[in-house]
Amino acid sequence: ETQHNTTEVTVIPNCDFCARLEVEWPAEYDGKTFLRGWAYMCGPHFKQFGVGLGLGRGQRLVQVVH
């Protein structure tokens, strides 16, 4: 994968958009939205609201265990 397209996290947060619907669903991305904010997003919400991957745009979350 291209540099800056992924970021390592120890805990996968929930999708911010799903949380607004009172649904707990794991996020797959941390990214900028076309709504001008940043959010944790599941795959479908990233496709709907995300602006892409890369530095200053968004990263796919990769869980690591330390």
Image (cartoon, rainbow, N blue to C red):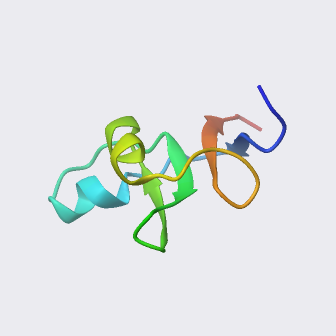
Residue 51 in the image, given as x and y percentages of width and height: 52, 53
Compared across the picture, whether 44 is left or right of 31 comes to left
Number of numbered discs: 0
- The x and y percentages for residue 53 are 64, 44
Instruction: Tell me the residue at 80%/31% (across/down).
Output: 2
Relative side of 29 to 45, left or right: right
Question: Which residue appears at 60% of the width and 41% of the height?
Answer: 61
Q: In this orientation, which residue lies closer to the viewer: 33 or 61?
A: 33
State the residue at coordinates (39%, 41%).
47
Asked whether 55 or 23 is in front, the reply is 55
For the view shown, which residue lies furthest in the right direction? 3
Q: Quadrant of the N terminus?
A: top right
Q: In the rendered view, would you say 33 is above or below 27?
A: below
Q: In the rendered view, would you say 54 is above or below 65? A: below
Q: Measuring from the top left, give residue 62's x and y in whole percent.
A: 64, 35
Looking at the image, the residue that sits furthest to the top is 1
Residue 27 placement: quadrant: top left
Identity of the residue furthest to the left in this view: 21
Vertical arrangement, residue 2 with respect to residue 20, above or below:
above
What residue is drawn where x is 38% and y is 54%? 49
Where in the figure is residue 24, as x and y percent of width and height?
26, 49
In which quadrant of the rendered image does the C terminus lie? top right
